[in-house]
Image (tube, rainbow, N blue to C red):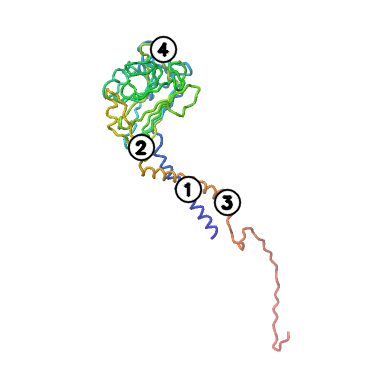
Amino acid sequence: MEILAVSGTRRRYYYCFFLVVSCCFLTLSVAKPLASFAYKRFDEKTFSFGTEIGLYGDAKVVNDSGGSVEMNGNMVWSSGKVVHRKPIQLGNRKSPVSFSSYFSFSISSENGDGLAFMLIPKGFPLVNGGGSFGLGDKLENSGSKVVAVEFDTLKNVEHGDHNGNHVGIDLGSLVSVKVSNASSVNVVLNSGKKLHSWIDYDASSKRLEVRLCNFSESRPNDPLVSYQIDLSRTWKEEEVFVGIGSSSGNSTQTSSVYSWSFRLRRVPTWMHSEPLDPQEYSNVYSHENKPPVIHTRTVCAFKIVTVLLFGVGCGALAASIMLFLWTVFANRRAAVVPAEYADHPVEYGYEKIKVVAEKATTDGKK
């Protein structure tokens, strides 16, 4: 009976362990990556027929520094783009999607338009180049929903630029809704040196962040520029292209991209923040381009309880794993068997015994 008790206890531990692990995997499966690509270097095979990335305008592959894309030619009014040709969907209000992108680049010393990371609606023409960052004149049209992060090296007064070394976030216009000076992180954009850039959008906080540093430095903890925006409201269920564009402007400036990666990720719905007022974004793409006013969000008690329950579940998972390992390894013991049923074989000896039976007489004599 004691053997059965030990076996039954371990069986219950197994059931508990696999139940908790299954629930955990079910939750994490909701946040699995949706789509991603990564190019550590560029060569002719990268842009061969049938690949998901393409060159537009004056952009071309060069073999300097291990393979890179020269975004525009060494001439005035030259522009080009590198675009991932498979459109992506950043979700809707019920299922928004986060993304992260990294690329390394350099810009020559002339004062041109610089370079920009872009999210382009599917209906926007990719072939037509020219204009700032290779987007043509359609960027200024009313209703354009291009979202760009510009690394600008030209002080353009009509666009409200404060200097010729800034990073800005553009929404349907070259007039940035948020700008930061690259000099604040000891970066000169048109130094000709390689630079790092990270662009992250968090669907739960509805926040777009841009980080920048020199090539010899590691990723900064704090973003250089950030902006509150709900991209799921901007495009709803519309598909967009991801790309990087550059233009020389009235100069011979050239820009190069050496590596590029991009990843989408969907997070569980219960982790999303309260949506912002959609009326605030109705004028984002208007001619005035006034940045929306962000109100303080209220905290939902139900979401707090849900997060706490999720934390308790993770703690229970850790406790179950420890208990399981302790049961299997630390508390391992031999099965208990009653002493009268010994496990070891016992040898028995045999001896002949002779029994003599005698008859008794009637008078009791032998």
Disc assigned to residue 332: 3
Badge 4 crowding class, 10 Å Cα cut-off, few under 14, some 14 to 19, many 20 or more, is some
Q: Measure how far apart labels 2 and 1 are at the Cα level.
A: 32 Å
Q: Nearer the viewer, mark 3 or mark 4?
A: 4
- Residue sitting at the far bottom: 363
Q: Label 1: which residue? A: 17
**Kind of residue at badge 1:** Phe
Q: Label 4: which residue? A: 110
Of mark 3 and mark 4, the one earlier in the sequence is 4
Q: Are marks 3 and 1 in contact (CB under 8 Å)?
A: no
Q: Measure how far apart labels 3 and 1 are at the Cα level.
A: 18 Å
Q: Are marks 2 and 1 in contact (CB under 8 Å)?
A: no
Q: Nearer the viewer, mark 2 or mark 3?
A: 2
Q: Measure how far apart labels 1 and 4 are at the Cα level.
A: 63 Å
Label 2 residue SS = loop
Q: Position of residue 166 (x, y in %)?
A: 40, 20
**Kind of residue at badge 2:** Ser
